[in-house]
């Protein structure tokens, strides 16, 4: 079998895509529930859900940026644990 450390999950682009997808799935579900509640509420104006969606787009970008700063090892596996620049080379 092949070495699992050289698999697809060790590539930083794949890891970032997976983490971003999981973040958007969880965060997006919460946004959908709140937006549906605002849109179907008789006490709030119709435009409030649009304002909420706009604000949530800005907030999600800020939150994801903070998550990347807090846990950089989730997004870049090459910098973690390797001490030698030669180890990062793909060709000898």
Image (spheres, helix red, strand yellow):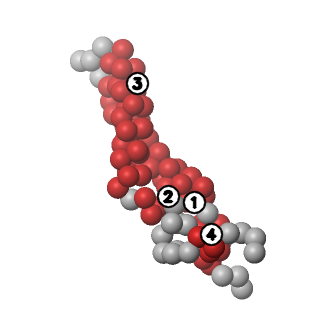
Mark 3 Cα-neighbour bin, 10 Å: few <14, some 14–19, many ≥20: few
> Any mark on residue 12, and which?
1
Question: What's the distance in space between the residues labelled 3 and 4, CA to CA?
Answer: 41 Å
- The C terminus sits in image quarter: bottom right
Label 1 element class: helix
Q: Earlier in the sequence, mark 3 or mark 1?
A: 1
Res 89 → quadrant? bottom right
Res 63 → quadrant? top left
Q: Earlier in the sequence, mark 4 or mark 1?
A: 1
Foreground pick, 92 / 60? 92
Residue 55 in view, yes or no: yes
Foreground pick, 19 / 46? 19
Question: What's the distance in space between the residues labelled 3 and 1, CA to CA?
Answer: 29 Å
Q: Earlier in the sequence, mark 1 or mark 2?
A: 1
Question: What's the distance in space between the residues labelled 2 and 3, CA to CA?
Answer: 26 Å
Residue 27 vertical placement versus 34 (above, below): below
Residue 22, given in percent of the width and then of the height, sits at: 48, 53
Residue 37, given in percent of the width and then of the height, sits at: 33, 30
Q: Check disc 2 and report the residue beneath it.
A: 75
Q: Earlier in the sequence, mark 2 or mark 4?
A: 2
Q: Are marks 1 and 2 in contact (CB under 8 Å)?
A: yes
The residue drawn where x is 43% and y is 58% is 72
Label 3 element class: helix
Q: Check disc 3 and report the residue beneath it.
A: 54
Is 48 positioned to the left or the right of 20 in the image? left
Q: Which mark is nearer the camera, 4 or 1?
A: 4
Q: Earlier in the sequence, mark 3 or mark 4?
A: 3
Q: Are marks 2 and 4 in contact (CB under 8 Å)?
A: no
Residue 85, given in percent of the width and then of the height, sits at: 59, 70
The residue drawn where x is 62% and y is 78% is 4
């Amino acid at each position: 079998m092949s070495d699992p450390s050289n698999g697809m999950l060790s590539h930083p682009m794949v890891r970032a895509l997976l983490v971003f997808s999981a973040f958007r799935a969880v965060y997006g579900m919460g946004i959908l529930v709140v937006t549906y509640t605002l849109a179907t509420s008789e006490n709030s104006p119709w435009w409030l859900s649009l304002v909420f969606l706009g604000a949530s787009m800005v907030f999600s970008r800020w939150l994801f940026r903070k998550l990347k700063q807090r846990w950089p090892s989730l997004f870049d596996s090459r910098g973690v644990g390797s001490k030698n620049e030669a180890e990062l080379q793909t060709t000898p």
